[in-house]
Image (cartoon, grey):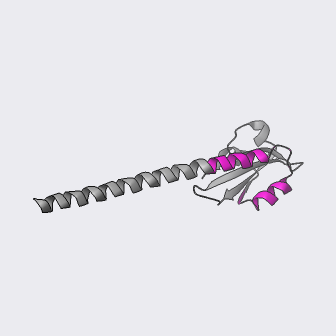
Amino acid sequence: MKTSKITLIIVLTIIGIVFMVAVGLIASGEYLNRKSKRELTQLVSELAPGTSFMVVKLRLGEPSQIYTNSEEIEGFGTTKDKSVTTNCLLFKFFIRRSIPFRWVLIYTDRNTNAVVYADWQDM
């Protein structure tokens, strides 16, 4: 009788610990996700329309992907606005700062090389 009580207490303790670890992992993942979204929203807001692409490169480094075709820009970008996708280039910068990994998207005017639109997206 006493052995079964001790066994039950040990099993319930282990289940409780596993449950608390799972809740902690979910909560920390959600925290990192929200923190990353806040940081990216702030970063994108700092890259306002009219900003030189050289400033963007100084801030983000070299782009990981470049799209020049308007169909690809619409397919791989976040905007379908023809006024943006028709006369722009799309530069995607891979952000490795924290998990989850995300892209910063910079649309630049083909002629002036200035930022027209900036956004971010999940991988």
Taking the spot 59% from the left edge, 47% from the top edge, the residue there is 34
Residue 40 location (% of width, % of height):
68, 49
> In this orientation, does residue 76 appear?
no
Quadrant of the image containing the N terminus: bottom left
Which of the 4 image quarters holds residue 56? bottom right
Main SS, magenta residues? helix
Q: Is residue 8 left or right of residue 44?
A: left
Q: Find out whether residue 56 is within the magenta segment.
A: yes
Residue 120 location (% of width, % of height):
68, 48
Taking the spot 86% from the left edge, 51% from the top edge, the residue there is 52
Looking at the rendering, the stretch of residues picked out in magenta corresponds to 36-65
Which of the 4 image quarters holds residue 83? top right
Which of the 4 image quarters holds residue 75? top right
Taking the spot 73% from the left edge, 36% from the top edge, the residue there is 81
Front one among 70 and 116: 116
Residue 4 location (% of width, % of height):
14, 59
Taking the spot 86% from the left edge, 44% from the top edge, the residue there is 50
Name, please, the residue furthest toward the left: 1
> In this orientation, does residue 108 appear?
yes
Q: Is residue 112 left or right of residue 116?
A: right
